[in-house]
Every structure is written in structure tokens, then in C-alpha cells.
Image: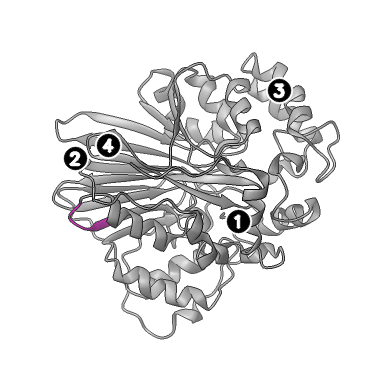
Amino acid sequence: MSEQKPEVSRRTFAGGVAAGTLAGAVGTMGVYSYSPWRQRHFVKAEPTRRQIGEVKSVKVTNISETSWFDNRTLMNDIRGAGGLLVNQYTYNWAPFTDVKGKLGKGSYEQGVRNIQPYLAKANLEEAWAFQMENAVNPLNSGGFSALIEVETLEGETKRILLDSGWSFDWIDKSFQREGIDKMLAENKIDIFIVSHEHFDHFWGVPVVFKYAPTIKTYYPKGFYAEGLDYFDVAGHRGERIETQPGLTVLFPGAALYNFQTPIICRVFGEQSLFFNVKDRGLVTITGCCHQGILQFASVAQRAVEAKKLYGLYGGLHVSPFEEWDPKYDDLVAVFKKWGFEKVACNHCTGILTARKLQEAGIGIVSGTARFRSKDTAYLGNGDQVTFAMTDDDKPTVLVPAGSASAAPAPAGGGVKY
């Protein structure tokens, strides 16, 4: 069994994250994910590698990786609200805004009172109309969400919805674009998993419960009182499971791993997914990877019995604002040694990071830059990736031709976090 950590407190959070905020500079959010200060928060991996079983394949549909649409707007909001340690529920961002909400002057309690009458009737359109009129920069909100379809060794398909985004309007339309609304309504999605409590991964949860109010839901230990209450306000009436630190097996070949780690905007804990694909190895799927990709990969290798580290999907939390710290050059070199054959990164990875990984010879899956994803450098909105026993679909690996540091940042402000 994994060792237990003390209950999360505001002091625990602030003490853990303050060392990595670098005086509150928003542009260096990725640095702390790779700093030594975080190590004391992590649960030790199981002393022996656990056998979780095997699956035939894992297919991921990227519903939305665009958490917001303008970096500068988001950075200014966080700075204006008081910095990285400030409680996210006080920003007066949608959906928890007060009437004519002022930046940094809100509260969860007041915000919920304003939207609860709409959510009680599953009237998300009116709830969002209120946000458009009163919230701080509501048009900048998007969200992260992905559909994971797993084929078991017996030929059964199990579907997992990972995260619910931020904007009710954006996520509902994204669900409709990919047919997720119908899958939820017809009970064709078996499990809903919340990776962590951040606004862009969790606050769109009423959209999920609008279509599937009784869906089985997993969330990581570390949620604050506001987040726990929001499940009820958003309309969830089904089984809700709080995962403990360490490994939780979902079904043969699939498991969650709960990393207990402090995260910016007063959030604690993030869980990621492991799938053991027969004859190929371990596929790892993450929302933001606030625990750091090297810690993530290291734990995956130590905790689960598998042939090798085979595939990865999700946000790697390296350069979400397209900044580049010299430490990341070492990170790219170490990451390459893990030997992942197929990496479908996006979201808070950063476009610059995806390009550098590809130039280093890592098998990065390119995207199509549709539906407001900004670049083909990684898997965008509406794109899919499959990890399978019979996987002949290899990413094109570039032969390094010069310094990776020459890779230009994308035009416009980036999108990912």
C-alpha cells in the first residue's frame, strides 16, 4: 500500500508551492514542476512493481486542449488577482463570478449562489449568459478534456472521459463536435475522471452531469471544500470515489496514480492514468503533469509491471507560456532516454517544447491545428492517437539539424496550460 500523507491545509499548500513561484512570476510556471523542492511531497512508489493486467489498445480523442485563448490576458488576470498563491475561486472568473465581478474580489459562495438556480434546471445556456455579462474575461476560457477508448483483451470497449474543461459554452460545443454529448446521454462512457481541481480541467463539470448525472466519477484526494461542494451543485447524483495517494486499479490493464503535490492557484494533488498495452508497454496519460514529466515517467516505470515505457498523451507542463528555461534542455535529454516510441503531447506542454522534443529525435505525433488549436506541432482539438498491440503507425522523427534552441515561438500568445 502507498503511504498516507497528512490532510491538505492552506499552510501545507503555501509552504510547498512558494519555493517554486520565483517571486510570483507567472511566466515561469513550468520551472517548479522540475525543481527538487517538490520531491518531499511525493508518495513513494509501491516497493514492488504491480501487475495491473493488459489491454489490446488505447485510443485518445482530444476533445479540447485549448484551456484559454490568450496567454497575456490570463497572465494579467493572475497577477491582478494577487499572484500564483491566490485561491482560484476568488478571481471572479466564470463560472464563479459575482454581479459585475471585480478581479480578485470574488468568492466561491457568492459565485455559486448566482449560478445555482440555473444549474438546478441544467440550464447551462442562461448560466453562461450570466458569466458573459458579469465575469472577468469570460471569452478567454476554454478547457481541457479527452475521451479515452480502451479495448480489453476480451474485445470489450471501455470509455473514460478525462476532465471537463472550463467554459460551459466551449466544452458543450466541443462535446457536440465529437459526439461526447450523445455518448454520455446513452451511458456509453463508463467512467469520468477529474485529473485535478484547476479551473481549466474541472469548472466545466456541469456539462458532463447535464448529460450523465449518475456517471461514476473519480477525483484525487486533495480537493478543497469548494470543489467537493461543486460536484453536488453541478448536479452529480452518482458514485463518487476519492482516490488515495498512489496506485488505484480501474480494470485489468488500467490504473490511476494519485500524485500528492501542491499546485498553483491553491490546488493540491493530480492523478494520471497508466495503461499496459500487451506486447508494447505502458501508455501514460496526463492532464497537466504538475508532478513533472520526469517524476511521472519514473513513477510509472517503478510502480507498474510492463515491458517498457511505450506511449504518452497529454500536457507535460514544461513551457505553457512558450518561455524556455535552460534547465529544460537537460529535461529534453533525459526525457529522450526514457525511450517513449510515441508522444502525443499538447495543452501545457507548449508548442516550443513540442518542437524541441521532435528536433531531439523523439517521436512526437503532429496535429492538424483545427478548432482553435494554434499549431500542427502537436495533437490539436479533434485529433486522435492510438496506442495498440499491432501499432505500425510511427510518428515521423526529425533528424536534428542544428540547435533546437532556434525553434521559433508561435505567433500570437500561445494557448496552453
Total residue callouts: 4
Q: Give the amino acid type for the residue marked by disc 3 in the picture.
A: Glu
Tell whether 83 sits left or right of 310: right
Residue bearing the label numbered 1: 16
Would residue 288 be seen by someone viewing this image from the given angle? yes
Residue bearing the label numbered 2: 53
**Marks 1,4: beta carbons within 8 A:** no
Residue bearing the label numbered 3: 126
Q: Is the magenta stretch mostly helix, strand or loop?
A: loop
Measure the C-alpha gap from mark 4 to mark 3: 36 Å
Q: Which mark, by number, is residue 150?
A: 4
Q: Give the class, few, some or many, for how many residues have Cα within 10 Å of label 2's Cα (few <14, many ≥20).
A: many
Q: Which is more foreground, mark 1 or mark 3? A: 1
Q: Which is more foreground, mark 2 or mark 1? A: 1
Q: Which residue is drawn at 67% across and 53% down?
A: 14
Q: Which mark, by number, is residue 86?
A: none
Classify 216 as above or below 65. above
Q: Quadrant of the C terminus?
A: bottom right
Q: Earlier in the sequence, mark 1 or mark 4?
A: 1
Measure the C-alpha gap from mark 4 to mark 2: 13 Å
